[in-house]
Structures are given as C-alpha cells and as structure tokens.
Image (cartoon, helix red, strand yellow):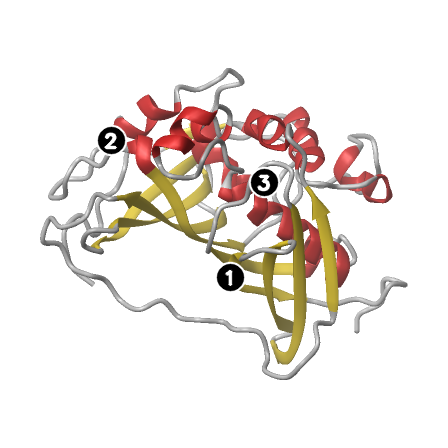
Amino acid sequence: MSGPGVGFQFPSVDVTWLKRDVLLFANSIGATVDELHFLYELHPDFAVFPTYPILLPFKNSTQEVIDFYAAQKSNPIPGVPKFDATRVLDGQRSITFLKPFPVTSAGKSFELRSKVLGVYDKGKPGSVVETQQDVVDKATGESYVKMVGSAFYVGQGGWGGPKGPATENYPPPKGKKPDAVVEHQTFAESALLYRLNGDYNPLHATPEPGKAMGFGGAIMHGLSSWNFACHDILKAIGGSDPKNIREYQARFASPVKPGDKLITEIWKTGDVKDGWEEIRFHTSVEGGKVCLSNGRALMKPVTSSGSKL
C-alpha cells in the first residue's frame, strides 16, 4: 500500500527494562497472589506478562518520568500534517508474541524499530496514524514481539489524505453464551498506578486535558483496559501461562473512567489452526457501553487443572 507517510521508518530507539519494571506492570494490571510467577522474581517460573512490551515505546530506556507531549512531537512524519499530541487517543492495538520475552534486558541490547503503515484522513472527526513496532535483539536481528497500533488524532482531519481501508471485524459468535465472564474493578487511583509503567500522558492523571476533549475529566489509559482484559483472558482461558497466548488485539470503543468496573465476556470459537484456537471477547463498563470491541486472541485453552482443553 502506498500513500502519505507509508513506509517511513522512525529512528530506532534503545529499550531496556528491569525485573522491577515487569513486577510493577503485573501488579498494575491485576495479577493476583495465585499468579506468583508474574509477581515474585524468585519464583522458579518467573515470567514477564506477555503484553508488557506494549509499554516500551513510551518508556524506552529511562527509569524517569517522561514528558509525554514532547516525546510525541520529536519525530514528525514527512508528507502529513504535524498532529497535536495533546488530542490523541488509541484506536486499536494488536500484538504478536514471537519469542519468550526476557524478564530483564540486562546482558543483551534491544531496540525498538518502528515504521508507518498508513496515515488516514477521517475528515472532521480526525486522522489515524497506523504503525508497526518490533522489539529486536540488536545482536541477532531477531524480533521478540510485533505490535501494530493506530493513534486517533481528535479533530485533526480534512487535510486531503486517503480515508484508509475498512477494519476487519471479529464479532462474538452469534447465539452463543460466553465461555467465561470476568470482572475487573478499577479505582480512583488506578490510572495513577498504571502510568508508572512509562505512559505519562497527562490525560490520565489530571482533569484538564480530559475536560478539553469532552470527557469531563481524567480517563483511564486505553491500554490499561486493554491489558486488564488480556490478563483476565489469559487467566480464565489459558491458565495464566504466557506460553498459551500467541496473538491479542482489541479496538478502543469508548472511554473508561477511574472507578469503573469492567466486564469482559469471552468466547471460544472452536476454530483451531496449528494448535491455536481463536478466542473472541469484548469488554464493557458495568451498566454502560462496550469499551473494548473487536477483541480477538489466539490461545491454547486449558482446564482449571491446567491440562489442554
């Protein structure tokens, strides 16, 4: 596909993480005491929760707080307008797990390689920038994880760019009850904890940006809800074993506010290829709207005893 900005490669960025980072992440997305392999560094099966790498494009290699707006402005895309990062939301995210992710980057050198897949003009509502990001071992060139995401720049369309392709939909199976339903209670402080992973967008910490965007105040990170749901699905369907998930994705359908209770409904489709079954899901705010739609994962389901279903 061709178009404005397509194929543009951002400068590669070194990424590093500590065991402490992955412990904080697991705590912030709701891992529980029966999942000590995500929460205790001396556990014999200590592992990174699989979606942790989604934070590395925000964190890079620092342990310090980041100026979110300045970081977003640092690499404009040639051939498209300079979008305002103070009015940006996540559109959709997918992640493919290619190799087991190390619990620390110590002893190796990793970099984030990013490229533009498309920039789409949606008219008055805004513009979408779709990118692919890979976490790569610099010594071997091996990619450990592939991440595709779309950023929606609110009210910043109408510049004459392409509208972009239609998104493929993954609805729940018709007429089938969910195979699992999981609740996740957020709290007033949930976004303030989650942001310590490296995603320091002020939209999720202080009310002013959210009021300016029509949300009435601070909202949860879209990626926090996305990660909450992945944790709930892996625990309910995959026995909390990171080896039992290959792909995961969801679309951000509506905002979540700190304190909302999230309800994730999960369906097994029976569609199995090369040992991986397609799972569908959506997440709603209790008593309200769907906040994560188009949910899909490739998994190896297990029973409560840990055996494969």
Question: Gap in Å between the C-alphas at discs 3 and 1?
Answer: 21 Å
Q: Which amino acid does label 2 sit on?
A: Asn
- Residue that numbered label 3 is attached to: 52
249 and 43: which is toward the camera: 249
Tell me the tag on residue 161. Answer: none
Secondary element at image label 3: helix
Secondary element at image label 2: loop
**Which residue in the rendered view is the most extreme toward the bottom?**
175
Q: Residues within 10 Å of mark 3 (few under 14, many from 20)?
A: some
Tell me the tag on residue 75. Answer: 2
- Residue that numbered label 1 is attached to: 293
Relative to 11, say whether 154 is above or below: below
How many numbered discs? 3
Question: Gap in Å between the C-alphas at discs 1 and 2?
Answer: 30 Å
Secondary element at image label 1: strand
Task: Please report whichever mark, 3 or 2, sits nearer to the chain's N-terminal start.
Answer: 3
The C terminus - image quarter = bottom right
The N terminus - image quarter = bottom left
Mark 3 and mark 1 residues within 8 Å of each other at the beta carbon:
no
Question: Gap in Å between the C-alphas at discs 3 and 2?
Answer: 24 Å
Q: Mark 1 or mark 2, which is nearer to you?
A: 1
Q: Mark 3 or mark 1, which is nearer to you?
A: 1
Q: What residue type is labelled 3?
A: Tyr
Relative to 268, say whether 226 is above or below: above
Residue 15 coordinates in the image, percent (x, y)? 47, 29
Task: Please report whichever mark, 3 or 1, sits nearer to the chain's N-terminal start.
Answer: 3
| Quarter assignment of residue 245 | bottom right
Mark 1 and mark 2 residues within 8 Å of each other at the beta carbon:
no
Identify the residue at image location x=52%, y=43%: 223
42 and 214: which is toward the camera: 214
Residue 187 coordinates in the image, percent (x, y)? 67, 34
Residue 96 coordinates in the image, percent (x, y)? 51, 56
